[in-house]
Image (cartoon, rainbow, N blue to C red):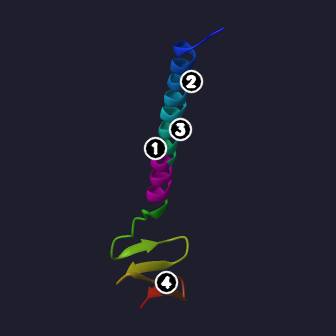
Amino acid sequence: MLRGPLLVWGCVWHQRKSMKNFQHIVKGSILLGLVMFSSGCIVAEPRDGYYEREHHRYYREHAWHECREHGDEYYCH
């Protein structure tokens, strides 16, 4: 069993170690949160004039424009 100065030193060492562990957990959590937040905010915009065949529309001037069916072909305006 620890007594006297060894007991005090043991408690101080334990407090410093637990505080360092807590700081590492906080820093890691903040970093993980920033990575998750930043990866969800980055969205690539299609290039101007991109045609999406599945929905028959094209991208122009930062907006999607629908193409209408005209006979066997689609007309985009």
Instruction: Tell which circle, 1 or 2, labels the residue nearer the N-terminal end.
Output: 2
Amino acid type, label 2:
Cys
Whether label 4 touches label 3, CB < 8 Å = no
Instruction: Tell which circle, 2 or 4, labels the residue nearer the N-terminal end.
Output: 2
**In terms of secondary structure, where does tag 1 sit?**
helix
Residue furthest toward the front? 4
* Disc ID at residue 11: 2
Closer to us: 38 or 72: 38
* Disc ID at residue 27: 1
Residue 4: percent from the left, percent from the top? 56, 14
Please give the residue where the numbered disc 3 appears in the rendered image.
22
**Residue density around tag 3, few if under 14, some if 14–19, many if 20 or more, within 10 Å:** few
Residue 15: percent from the left, percent from the top? 54, 30
Q: CA distance from mark 4 to mark 1?
A: 55 Å
Amino acid type, label 3:
Phe
Amino acid type, label 4:
Tyr
**In terms of secondary structure, where does tag 2 sit?**
helix
Q: CA distance from mark 1 to mark 2?
A: 24 Å
The residue at 42%/73% (across/down) is: 51
Q: CA distance from mark 3 to mark 1?
A: 9 Å
The residue at 66%/8% (across/down) is: 1
In the image, is residue 8 above or below residue 40?
Answer: above
In the image, is residue 77 part of the stretch drawn in magenta?
no
Whether label 2 touches label 3, CB < 8 Å = no
